[in-house]
Structure formats: structure tokens, C-alpha cells
Amino acid sequence: EAMPMEIAQTMLAQAMAAAPVEACEETYGVFPCSSSFWGSIFLVCTYGYLLLQGANLISDGSELLLAVMDPGLIGGLLLPILGALPDSAMIVMSGLGGSIEQAKEQIAVGIGTLAGSTIMLLSIAWGGSLWLGRCDLERGMAVDKRLTRQFDLTKTGVTSDAGTRINAYIMVASSLLFLTPQIPSAMGYMHDPAAALWGGILCLVSLAAYCVFQVVWPELQKRQADAAHRKLLRANALQMASSIAKAAGSVLIDSNGEVREDALRELFVRFDSDKSGAIDGDELRKMMTVLSQANRKSPTAQELERDVVFMLQELDADGDGKITLEELKLGVRRWLAELKKQSASGEAKGGATDSTPLLSSGQANVDEEAGGADDDDDDEEDESKEPMTPAQIIGKAAQLLVGGTFIVALISDPMVDSVSSFSKASGVPAFFVAFVVTPFASNASELVSSLQFAKKKKIKNISLTFSQVYGAVTMNNTMCLGLFLLIVWYRGLDWDFSSEVTTTMVSIFALGVVASTRNTFETYWAFVSLMLYPLALALVFFLDYQLGWH
């Protein structure tokens, strides 16, 4: 006989009330927590977004520093550590807080973040950069900015320089550090906490050696600094053009977002001192000197020549060593188009931060001038704006770095708790959740900037992109792994991550061996690289749940 509806509802309510509900504890007594499926998803997304903002601030501050400071000391010591900070904070917080039992549960988030970050860089960042940066191949070399065979997987590709291979060698060598905690198990002994301690120390010593190498041989940092400096030059040139146009009663950008030719003519006439109809090398030097003085900086002769060469490369379309008004107009239009793309990519990676003076000053001019020239007060205010001085850039970089570090340190612990809660609520192991989720929050800035940089389709750009990927993986193998091992030793946790270590090392060796033995990569290698991501997840699952590795 059917049970009456009222009795059924009562029994269901009693059963739900009697069901055990695991309570959660707010992190620091402030940050919300949830034990439910949808609540934990919401918190993972929220904290992941905040972690992304912190990582973006650190990345933006690092780029500003490289534009004005010595690339060896800053790029070799400070910036690699700052770049690995978001992942490091997640790893430390996964095992440092709570009881030993909680640490045993949450440490899977740490190893998932470490493995996921490494494999995401080797697959999505590397493979995506190869696909976006591919050019036609001739005689085994990529031809800059030429792609006539869009979908030919063997006759298109990229070429990196010889120095990039050195970074690949270092990445592969540093991956051997993963073996240190595995040695007792390989010899048939039980887990020895001392192995984790000595492994952690060896990783940090290797980190110090890597930083020293970066200072002594700062090729990667020089290339990063050069890219940042070129952005700064474009931004300051746009701002100078805007100021000259406004002084003449015009604006650089009209209400439709188009460059006004009369405004550019004012800039052109200002520096075409011999009225020849073209800005030659000497006139361009005067222009670059004025640009440097606007930054309150006196460039050396070598720096001035470097800037002149760069401007000729950017604006001299026919290669005759002179810049015509038409070439200037085409170049400025291209700069503004690139600036809008960078602004859009900044929004795509989750932040509207002023990542460089190019965005903070150049984009401001685009937005403000697009409204027209009717507002005299705004024009007068804009005329008083000057390019940022080196001291101001350093001050802004410091603010971004401190703010980003604070956010990352504050959000990492609640992020770890939320990932663990989602794992329990969904039944998905915490390692797989962290493997997929946290790297896209902590490394999104590097991922987007690498892909954007590779799209320029130049050998020097792809060389810098690949070197950044190899350098980031090396930091994971030294700094992040070292901190993880020290946490395992400090909390007395068992080392049962053989499947994760094997998967990470196999991925590094698979790409590292290829990257360290050749300079040119056909486009099909992009798909081989992208397959590393799903194959790594499948391999961990197979080793853990089919073979029972621990």
C-alpha cells in the first residue's frame, strides 16, 4: 500500500537531519568555507580568481622592473623567485596548516599544483606558442612573419636560437631532483624523512646555483628586458605624439578610434628639420633624445643607437633608412592595434591592471581622445601628463609586487581548503582537482603573455617564449619541489607520490630531450606537446589505481 505523502515527507526530513554533515572552518576566521558541492565550486572559482589577480600583479610589476633596472641582478635573482611565488604559496599552505591528518589530506593539493603547473607549461604554453608562432620553413629555418601554408604540419614551424637549448638542458637536468625522495623506496627501504630533508636542501642549493647562472649569463633576462623596453618606447612615442597634437589644438585619435593624419603631421614636421619629406637617422636621433629627456633619462650613445635601430625597424617599411609620413602613419596604426589586443588579453586573463606603461599611458590616450576634442579642461590636464620617470616606474613596480605578493599569501590557504572541500564533495581525488584548476590561476599571466608574444611570428620572440617556459619549469623543479619536500619532512608526512613524480619526469624528459637537440620544430610538434596534458592525467590514474603505485 502506498505510503501517505505526509509520512514520506516527514521521514525524508528526518533522514536529512540525521545525516552527518561535515562542518568546515573558516580560514583565518574570516574567509568563507563550504562542504557542499556547489558551495565549494563557487569558492574555488572565487579564490582562484583572486589568486589570478595576485599572480597578474606580480607579473606586471616584474615586467616594469625589467624595463628600467639591470636585467642580470633583477632578472636573475628576484624575478624567477617572484614568478614561482603563486605555486610555491599553494604548495606550502597545502601541508603547513591544520593537524597532521588534515595535512595528509591536503598535501595532495600541493603535489597536484606542482605537477599540473609543470605539465601545463610544457603542453599548453609550449604547444600553443608553437602553433600561434608558426611560419613557413625554408632550408630548415622559419621565415619571420611569413605564413603562406596555414595548415601544413611539416613545412611550417618555428625556429629558436641556440641559447634556448641551454635552458632546455638545464630544465631536464633539474628534473633529476625528483629522484631524491624516491631513493629509499627504490632500495627497498621504508620512507625515510631524512630523504625529504636532504632532497629539499639539494633543491634549494640547485635554486641558488640556477640564480647565480642567471646573473652570470643573463641572456634570457636581457631578452625580457629588451621586450619590456620596446613596449616602453612605443608608449612614450605615442604619448609624445599625443602631447604635440594637443599643443597644436588637435588630438591623435578621433571619435572613431582612427589616427588623425593632421596630428601625425605635427609630429613629423617637428622633427623633419631639413624639410626633406622624410625623417633621417640624425633627425631620428634627435627625436629619441627628446623622448629620453621626457623620461628624465640621459641615454648612453649605445642605448641611443639601439633605440634608433629599433624605431627604424618598426617604422621604416621600405628599409631606406628614412621614415616618411605615410610610414609613420602605418606604424602608429599598428602600435595602436597591438595596444588594443594587449588590453583585450589583459581582460581575458582576468585583470584590468596597468601591466606596462604602454597600457597605462597609451591606452588612456586612446580612450580619452576617442571622445573628441571638445573638453578643453581634459585636454589641458592631458597636456600636463608626462611619461613615467624610472623612479616612478620602480615605485609603481614595487606597489604591484607588494600587492600581488600579499594577495597570493593571503588567498593560498583558503584556496587549498576549497580545493580539498570540492574533492570530498565530488569524490574526485584532490590531486586531479589541483592538477587542473590551480595552474590556470597561478600561471595564467605567463600563459597569456607567452601566447601573445609568440603570435608576432619572429625567431627572437619564440626563443624568448620557449626560454620562459623552460625557466619556469626549472623553478618548479628547484624552488617549488624543494619547499614541498621540506614541508613533507617538517610535518613528518609519508612520501607516497611515486606515480606523480614518474609522470612529471616523463613529461619533462619527453619534451626536454626534443627541445635540447634541435632548434627548429615543425608544426606537428605542437600537437605532440598538447597531448602531454591528457596523457599525464591518464598515466597518473593508471599508475595509482591500476598498478597501485605509492
Image (cartoon, rainbow, N blue to C red):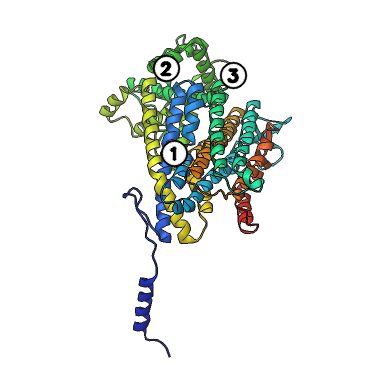
Q: Which amino acid type is shown beneath numbered disc 2?
A: Leu
Return the disc, 3 or 2, that comes first in the chain's sequence.
2
| Residue that mark 3 sits on | 319
Q: Relative to residue 315, is residue 35 drawn left or right? A: left
> Residue 542: x and y, percent?
64, 56
User: What residue appears at the point 39 percent right and 24 percent down from the top-left corner?
Assistant: 394
Mark number for residue 474? none
Closer mark to the observer between disc 1 and disc 2: 1
Q: CA distance from mark 3 to mark 2?
A: 23 Å
Q: Secondary structure at mark 3?
A: loop
Quarter placement of the N terminus: bottom left
Number of marks: 3
From this view, report whether residue 39 is shown above or below residue 127: below
Mark 3 and mark 2 residues within 8 Å of each other at the beta carbon: no
Q: CA distance from mark 1 to mark 3?
A: 41 Å
Q: Nearer the viewer, residue 146 or 444?
A: 444
Q: CA distance from mark 1 to mark 2?
A: 32 Å
Callout 3: few (<14), some (14-19), or many (20+) C-alpha neighbours within 10 Å?
A: few
Q: Which amino acid type is shown beneath numbered disc 1?
A: Ala
| Residue that mark 1 sits on | 55
Mark number for residue 291? 2
From this view, report whether residue 152 is shown above or below residue 219: below
Q: Secondary structure at mark 2?
A: helix
Return the disc, 1 or 3, that comes first in the chain's sequence.
1
As drawn, the residue found furthest toward the right would be 139
> Residue 176: x and y, percent?
63, 38
